[in-house]
Amino acid sequence: MSAVRALTGLAWRDTKQPMSETIPDIETVRSRLMEARLFQRLWAFDPRWVGSIPLDIHGPDADVDIACSAGPDLDAFRQHLEAELSGHDAQVTRNTHAGEPSIIARFSLDGLPVEIFGRTRPVETHESYVHWLAEDRILRLAEDRLRTDIRAIKLDGLKTEPAFARALDLGGDPYVELLKLASPGDDALGQLIQTAGYALKPEA
């Protein structure tokens, strides 16, 4: 896996969208991560940058979210994080979500909040990563107005998955519905986007 892929989950997207001065610029965030060599430090754990920032739908308080495969030994992953992040006053804790143990590290990188999340299973099976893949595909297919609307919805206080669900008129549990959208082909996603009132990009 290339360094670029690790930095975005798939590939780095440059953006031409104007951003508020109160919202961290994506290029600045990427530079901070590269300078800190954060992904090199996590390389053995298949790190993927997920969340709202690489999708360019983030607000001023967005975290840098990094999903990792901790491998079979969560304690070894925790010890690795504690050693590598010792200079950042990181809080590394063991958690349980939906009955599954995980390790979470939270710290600040020059004022930028970062959260590293690790489970024993491969990153490709993490719900956060599958959500990210679906959201990325949708935003690549849809006109830029969808991205703008999702930003606005998130600024009203909704998290990313509920914001997508509202914009696309998805029923049910937003987190379950986003998981379902990782599988359909582009034609099916395109129909969903158009049904919600958005046009497709000309190249989509």
Image: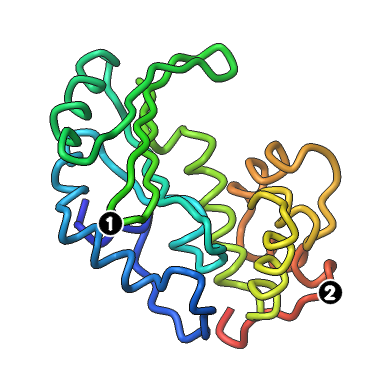
Label 1 Cα crowd, 10 Å radius (few <14 / some 14-19 / many 20+)? few
Say whether residue 96 is left or right of residue 72: right
Q: Residue 160: percent from the left, percent from the top?
A: 64, 52
Q: Is residue 93 above or below residue 14?
A: above
Q: Residue 17: percent from the left, percent from the top?
A: 52, 84
Residue located at (39% from left, 33% from top): 117
* Residue type at numbered disc 1: Asp
Question: Tag 1's secondary structure?
Answer: loop
Say whether residue 153 is left or right of residue 86: right
Residue located at (84% from left, 39% from top): 172
Say whether residue 29 is left or right of residue 190: left
In the rendered structure, find residue 135 and report the number of the disc placed on it. Answer: none
* Residue type at numbered disc 2: Gly
Marks 1/2: CA distance? 40 Å
Q: Looking at this view, is 107 or 75 the one in front?
A: 107
Question: Tag 2's secondary structure?
Answer: loop
User: Which residue is tagged 1?
Assistant: 110
Give whichever of discs 1 and 2 has the lower sequence position.
1
Residue located at (15% from left, 60% from top): 35
User: Which residue is tagged 2?
Assistant: 197
Residue located at (59% from left, 68% from top): 139
Q: Is residue 5 above or below residue 190?
A: above
> Which one is in front in this view, the residue at disc 1 or the one at disc 2?
1
Say whether residue 133 is left or right of residue 154: left
Q: Looking at this view, is 22 or 16 the one in front?
A: 22
